[in-house]
Amino acid sequence: MESWQKLLSNSVVKVEDLPFLSDTSDEYREKLKEVTKVFPIRINSYFLDQIKEENDPLWRQVVPTLEELDDFLSEEELLESDPLNEEGDMPVPELVHRYPDRVLLMVNNQCPIICRFCTRKRKIGFPGIVTRETLRQGIDYIRNHPEIRDVILSGGDPLLVPDKELDRILSELRAIPHLEIIRIGTRVPGTLPQRITQDLCAILKKHHPLYFNLHFNHPSEITAEVEKACNMLADAGIPLGSQTVLLEGVNDDALVMRELMLKLLKIRVKPYYIYQADMTLGTDHFRTTVEKGLDIMKDLQGHISGMGVPYFVIDAPGGGGKVRLLPNMVLEHNEKEVVIKNYEGKVYRYPQPSVKTPQNGKKPQTIEATVSADSACPLSV
Ligand code: SF4
């Protein structure tokens, strides 16, 4: 098996080497070069092998298109280079402190692939953004803030940090008494699974409690190599969750999402979030309507077990944090009953419990249930 370092060093990084381009004219390539000045290319050779044709769901995630420049020309100016205002919540460079008890620490800004829809387009792949000094300041900040219980290591991708350095970062964090949980946000297991080695797992095991947030967008990302990598991580005792970004032309389809969630469960990964795409400059062509996401959620709730149904969230523009959205299944709600519809549109009535006022020591009265025993049994779901 080729080493992950070799697969990474053989990445496509130039327009001339892009796969499956139907327009090979010099003019088109020159325009694409303009795109890559704003946002570089990286497609590692493992991921490249998984792409089958132009415009397939993997191709769309990593190959630049001219649409990326359209937003810059838009007069509406709705989109931003930092749509979640992360820079506004950085008390020290490359550390986001938005919620009271947890922080996000960027440990590098390199990734196994560079995703064209990335929320951190402004940072990924450019040199000199995350340095030893920013890392030192970030760890010092956590050490000096006892209210911080939980850190998520992000970037970039923390698993592209060499073993020894990653061990050092995790050891420094683990030595902070008030820090209870360390999470790692990574797309490595799904896009460069060879990086998950026995050596890496041995390092990670030393730093529990450790949680991984993975990133998968399409069922075809789940290959035999990816399954092996996830099994190794799960066997190292690391709970694995996954986030998915809802992307036009990639996964904006209920059947595709169903297949993805079911495949994730089979490789021991719990679907955690589906994100509505952020309003990031250069990514407007990937955004779908919010209704599309709600329809997909309705379908998932009806067709797969609750364990495979993630939360659907919008990360509120400007830094408002994650807000969960649910399809509206409540038709009416009053003190007597709640009227609900299921995923097939069938309507059901659920009576509220009676008001329990003790009467002369007698048991409180209850109204008769009108829901049959079968339909009320939670185990039948
Ligand atoms: S792996 Fe994550 S951080 Fe890196 S480019 Fe893709 S979405 Fe952005």
Image (tube, grey):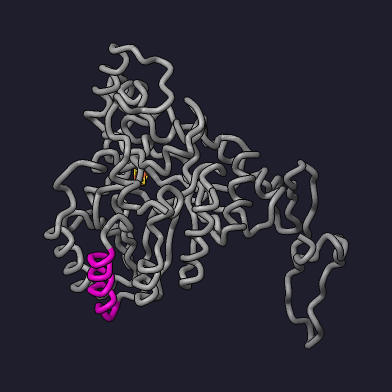
The foreground one among 286 and 374 is 286
Q: Answer with left or right where residue 16 lies relative to residue 136.
A: right
Quadrant of the drawing holding the C terminus: bottom right
The front one of 298 and 191 is 191
Q: Residue at x 38, y 41 (%)?
A: 45
Magenta stretch, main secondary structure class: helix
Viewer-nearest residue: 304 or 16: 16
The x, y position of residue 377, in whole percent, is 80, 66
Residue at image point 38% right, 36% down: 117
Please give the name of the residue rendered at 20% of the width and 73% of the height, measured from the top-left corner.
143
Residue 126, image x and y in percent? 20, 41
Q: Is residue 378 above or below residue 273?
A: below
Q: Does the segment drawn in magenta span residue 177?
A: yes
Q: Is residue 178 visible?
A: yes
Residue 144 lies left or right of residue 207; in this view the side is left
Coordinates of residue 165 in the picture (x, y in percent): 23, 65
- For this orientation, the residue located farthest to the front is 1
Q: Is residue 41 left or right of residue 348?
A: left
Q: At 75% from the left edge and 67% from the top edge, which residue is drawn?
A: 353
**Above or below for 78 versus 92:** above
